Amino acid sequence: MLTREEVLRTCDELHACIEQGPGEQPGLLGRCLGMLRELREQAGGRYRLERVRDLELLITAWFSPAVRPGDEAARERLLAAVSGLEESWEDPGAA
């Protein structure tokens, strides 16, 4: 099981990747999905798993041609999803 610190470090990396988007960036998308795959494998419960899956969908959309630079609504949804993921690992009952 990943520690809270490892999850926070991963979320910091996700934030850094998000700031380089939006738009089609296969390298960043692959990197983010790899991090999320590791989190999914370590989720340890339905609630956390749902947070990871939600984030996978949002990240995939973020690094696609569908989201245009300046789309603050998409960016805010994505950042809120990362925060929700962080919080799911902070709450031991959320597994």
Image: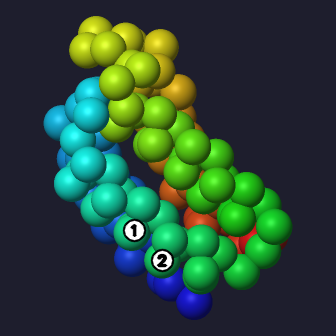
Q: How many marks?
A: 2
Query: Can residue 8 be seen in the rendering of this structure?
Result: no
Q: Is residue 11 above or below residue 81?
A: below
Quarter placement of the C terminus: bottom right
Name the residue located 71 percent from the left edge and 80 percent from the top edge: 44
x then y, percent, for residue 9: 32, 67
Q: Is residue 86 left or right of residue 16?
A: right
Q: Which residue is the extreme one toward the bottom? A: 1
Q: Is residue 24 above or below residue 91?
A: above
Colour logic: rainbow
Residue nearest the viewer, comparing 49 with 34: 34
x then y, percent, for residue 54: 64, 46
Q: Amino acid at mark 1?
A: Met
Residue nearest the viewer, comparing 94 with 23: 23
Tell me the element at label 1: helix
Report the Cα–Cα distance between label 1 and label 2.
5 Å
Name the residue located 69 percent from the left edge and 64 percent from the top edge: 48
10 Å neighbourhood of mark 1: few (<14), some, or many (≥20)? some
Label 1 belongs to which residue? Answer: 35
Q: Residue 66 lies in what quarter of the image? A: top left
Q: Is residue 56 above or below residue 10?
A: above
Evaluate if marks 1 and 2 touch, with contact meaning CB atoms under 8 Å apart. Answer: yes
Name the residue located 52 percent from the left edge and 38 percent from the top edge: 58
x then y, percent, for residue 11: 38, 57
Residue nearest the viewer, comparing 64 with 74: 64
Q: Is residue 63 left or right of residue 54?
A: left
Query: Can residue 40 be seen in the rendering of this structure?
Result: yes
Label 2 belongs to which residue? Answer: 38
Q: Residue 81 lies in what quarter of the image? A: top right
x then y, percent, for residue 20: 18, 36
Q: Which mark is residue 86?
A: none
Residue nearest the viewer, comparing 90 with 24: 24
